[in-house]
Amino acid sequence: MKRTAWRLFALGFAAAVIAAACTGGGGAGDWNVAYDKDKAKDQAKEFITYGIPDDWANYGESIKAFCDKNGFTCAHKDTDMSSLQEITNFDAEKNNPVAIAADIGIQFGPVAEAKGVVPSYLPPNAADLPQSFKSKTGGWVATFVGVPGFNVNVKALEDKGIPIPTKWSDLVKPEYKGLIGIGTIGESGTATTSWLAMTIAAGGSLDNLQPGIDFGKQLLPNIEGVPEGGDPEMERGEVPIQNKYDFNLIAQANRMAEKGIEVRTVIPEDGSIYAASALMVNKYNTAKMDVAKMFMEWVLSDEGQTVFAEFGARPVRYVLGTLTLPADAKAKWLSDDLYTKIQQVDLTTITIDKVKDIWNTEVLGQ
């Protein structure tokens, strides 16, 4: 999923402790105590994230609403990264942490835990989440779910005399060669989840990836050398088929419609899966610890969850049945009829390293 991405070893030397305090290094605070709102107010002035651009699931509005509610003045700055890049950067920058938080595909949560970049903290309202929707050790919580699918520039395909694909299985047909944009499988949460959805649609499962390997080999000629693509490439028809989560597909199609470009959002008829995104906070950024704790709590609150819904994403608490949404909050959602073949799977049961290795060795032949 590409989006914008997210100490000390206290060995008893006083100078090291002082230096860490100046840089916000890891040993300078206690993640297990309640947040201090007064401290958070100052910390929020520069709200730096990885993989949380303003247009990702309404995070720009979410951060604004969070800051307004608490009387904070926030300047949000984000850098676009894949889930794996965010985790890597948290670790690489541990002596001089930059980001407060990042958005990751939920399957990258165990990777973050294993890398040791997330703290032991969970907000109190995470207690109602099932274990598969939060870290076993702390530091990340599921926020909303998306369904992998794809957008199609209708005119671009019509001009080529090519039919609009409606299934994952259509994408392996030779007429779509060079037209499909997808991220890096094993690094991008969106791309990885999409390949797993393709695997299940092809008759596989999280325990049996062979159908996905076979499908991937057929898909490869159609995606090789094609950039993932964004609005400019969709508008110009350069990457007329783009893989994203449903809420981002909806948003892109609406933006294109404002320019008079017909973009069709496809939830594959041969099925897809629900995939949760998660908010991950940076263990090493203890200088911003209080605002990080508050923001984790916010994204699970009724207000925070509703902001996601208003964008087109399905809040995790709505999916779990612990949140009721007004009709206007669901105004941008696609019809429920398109979701009858969507499956729920536990993505935390499969390791990203395994997916990446299988894709690279058995599909790419590296």
Image (tube, rainbow, N blue to C red):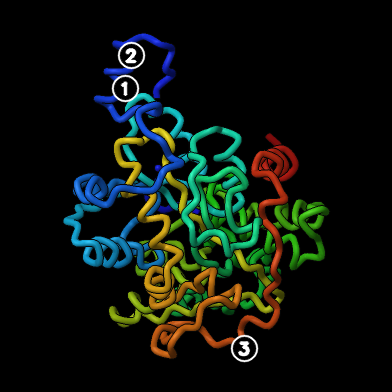
Residue 227 visible in the shown view: no
Query: Horizontal placement of 352 versus 234: left or right?
Result: right
176 or 351, which is in the foreground?
Answer: 351
Query: In terms of secondary structure, where does tag 3 sit?
Result: helix
Residue pictured at 55% horizontal, 53% vertical: 189
Outermost residue toward the front in this view: 33
338 or 45, which is in the foreground?
Answer: 45
Q: Quadrant of residue 223?
A: bottom right
Q: Amino acid at mark 2?
A: Ala
Q: In the rendering, at what x and y percent does residue 211 appear?
A: 80, 57
Q: Quadrant of residue 26?
A: top left
Circle 2 residue: 16
Residue 78 visible in the shown view: yes
Circle 3 residue: 337
341 or 255, which is in the foreground?
Answer: 341
Depth check, mark 2 against mark 3: the one in front is: 2
Q: How many marks?
A: 3
* In contact (CB < 8 Å): disc 1 and disc 2: yes
Circle 1 residue: 20
Q: Residues within 10 Å of mark 3 (few under 14, many from 20)?
A: few
Q: Amino acid at mark 3?
A: Asp
Q: Is residue 309 above or below residue 50?
A: below
Give the mark nearest the N terminus, 2 or 3.
Answer: 2
Query: Horizontal placement of 268 versus 182: left or right?
Result: right
Residue pictured at 43% horizontal, 76% vertical: 309
* In contact (CB < 8 Å): disc 1 and disc 3: no
Give the mark nearest the N terminus, 1 or 3.
Answer: 1
Q: Quadrant of residue 89?
A: top left
Kindly report the distance in space between the C-alpha atoms of the residues bearing marks 1 and 2. 6 Å
Outermost residue toward the left in this view: 73
Kindly report the distance in space between the C-alpha atoms of the residues bearing marks 1 and 3. 54 Å
